[in-house]
Amino acid sequence: MIDVNDCDFIQLFLLRYALDKPNDIVNLERDILDLQYFPERLQDSYLAEWKAYIKPELIALQRRDEHHNLANIMVNLEQGDNPHFNRLYDVIKTADKVNNSDAVTVMTTPFKSFVNQLLKI
């Protein structure tokens, strides 16, 4: 079984996308598209959310002996034949570049500073 704690953000996204359910409570596409405006969410919350989502799904697949289906889906995604996946994957790669760039700084608005101060109380 895959240990999600050893996965990088790309592997986690592949798994999360492959395991996504239609009409799920979390809109994965909306979350990914939000990274265009809030790239810090990738590291701050999404990776932990994805791990929490993936773990029980992997256990359920293993119990039903359907983990081979996941492997096939992952191979297809990695081959780049899915335009929807590719578009979201590009957003994730860009967010990671922004987060790891020395030339980019986060601009904090006065409102965000105020909320951060409230959270420290």
Image (cartoon, grey):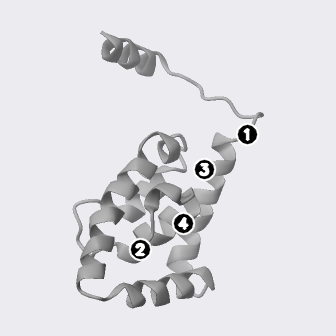
| Residue pictured at 52% horizontal, 75% vertical | 85
Q: Circle 4 is placed at which residue position? A: 11
Q: Circle 2 is placed at which residue position? A: 1
Q: Which mark is residue 101?
A: 1
| Label whose residue precedes the other's in the sequence (4 or 2) | 2
Q: Circle 3 is placed at which residue position? A: 95
**Marks 4/2: CA distance?**
14 Å
Above or below, 89 against 5 in this view is below
Q: Is residue 114 left or right of residue 11?
A: left
**Marks 3/2: CA distance?**
28 Å
**Marks 3/4: CA distance?**
15 Å
Q: Are the two marked residues, 1 and 2, in contact with CB atoms closer than 8 angstroms? A: no
Q: Position of residue 66 (x, y in %)?
A: 32, 88
Q: Amino acid at mark 2?
A: Met
Callout 2 secondary element:
loop
Q: Amino acid at mark 3?
A: Ala
Q: Position of residue 24 (x, y in %)?
A: 24, 67
Neighbourhood count class around disc 3 (C-alpha, 10 Å): few under 14, some 14–19, many 20 upward: many
| Residue pictured at 39% horizontal, 90% vertical | 69
Determine the residue located farthest toward the front in the rendered image: 1
Q: Position of residue 34 (x, y in %)?
A: 46, 51
**Marks 3/1: CA distance?**
10 Å
